[in-house]
Image (tube, grey):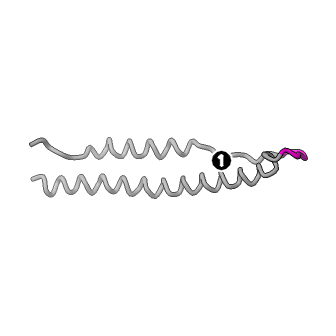
Amino acid sequence: MGKIGVDLQEWQTTVNRNYTALGRVDLLKQVELKQTDLKQFRNVDQTIERFNKTLNALKDQTADETQQLIQLGVNKQNDDAQYGK
């Protein structure tokens, strides 16, 4: 039977790379539109605000999940060391 385990450094690198990629997604900047009657532009500022709030929530959740995934890798490595003897 083959060995099962985790390369903790590779695991952490992969998890952190994904977290860092999300960090490169910038918030939208508010735009100043002059008066318009076009329906799709009347609430653009509210749409941008909702997008930015959602993006910030996603980043916060991803930060928490990143730490949990790294801890999962540490736990797996510890289990392998304890039970793989």
Residue 57 on image: x %, y %: 57, 57
Structural crowding at the residue carrying mark 1, measured as other residues with C-alpha within 10 Å and reported as few (<14), some (14–19) or many (≥20): some
Q: Quick check: is 35 in the magenta stretch?
A: yes
Residue at the far front: name it.
39
Q: Secondary structure at mark 1?
A: loop
Measuring 36% from the left and 46% from the top, which residue is drawn there? 12
Relative to residue 7, is residue 77 depicted above or below?
A: below
Measuring 29% from the left and 46% from the top, which residue is drawn there? 8
Residue 46 on image: x %, y %: 74, 54
Q: Main secondary structure of the magenta part?
A: loop
Q: How many marks?
A: 1
What's the magenta region? 33-38
Measuring 44% from the left and 41% from the top, which residue is drawn there? 17
Residue 42 on image: x %, y %: 82, 50
* Horizontal side, residue 63 vs residue 15: left or right: right
* Horizontal side, residue 29 vs residue 16: left or right: right
Three-letter residue code for mark 1: Leu
Q: Nearer the viewer, residue 58 or 6?
A: 58
Q: Nearer the viewer, residue 49 or 15?
A: 49
Residue 20 on image: x %, y %: 49, 44
Q: Quick check: is 34 in the magenta stretch?
A: yes
Measuring 9% from the left and 43% from the top, which residue is drawn there? 1
* Horizontal side, residue 54 vs residue 66: left or right: right
Q: Label 1: which residue?
A: 27
